Image (spheres, grey):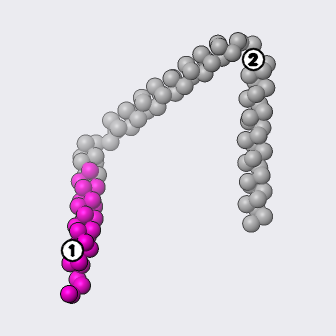
Amino acid sequence: MHQERRSESGLWYMIGGMAVGAVLGVLFAPKKGRETREDFGDWLRDGREREKSIMSKLSAMVPLRVKAAAALGAMKAGGAEAIREAAQRLNLDGAAE
């Protein structure tokens, strides 16, 4: 328990340090605020494009058979769950009336 508190306080110190560093970085930045915001927006857009590219490559690596098998498994599980729910609603789950 004492270890949990220590790690939680360390996390808060790290978050606080990052916030202070970000504020100081913006205050002493050599660019105007508008330029900094534009750069930040460009960085976010580039990150999204990189993410899409990585996901596309990963998706291409997974064979179609694996994707189809996963979809079939999900459909089977969903169907089984629907049958169980219907049986419970109709009281057909083995209970005698």
C-alpha distance separating marks 1 and 2? 68 Å
Picture residue at 46% right of the left edge, 25% below the top: 49
Q: Is residue 46 above or below residue 35?
A: below
Q: Which residue is mark 1?
A: 90
Verify whether residue 86 appears in magenta: yes
Q: Is residue 1 above or below residue 8?
A: below
Could you say where residue 36 lies in the image, as x and y percent from the top left?
66, 17
| Precedes in sequence: disc 1 or disc 2 | 2
Q: Residues within 10 Å of mark 1 (few under 14, many from 20)?
A: few
Horizontal relation, residue 80 to residue 7: left or right: left
Write the start and end of the magenta stretch as one range.
Answer: 71-97
Say if residue 73 shows up in the picture.
no
Q: Secondary structure at mark 2?
A: loop
Question: Is the stretch drawn in magenta largely helix, strand or loop?
Answer: helix
Residue type, numbered disc 2: Ala
Residue 82: assigned label: none
Label 1 sits on a secondary structure element that is helix
As drawn, the label of residue 29 is: 2
Let me know if residue 44 is in the magenta part.
Answer: no
Q: Is residue 31 visible?
A: yes
Residue located 60% across and 21% down the image? 40
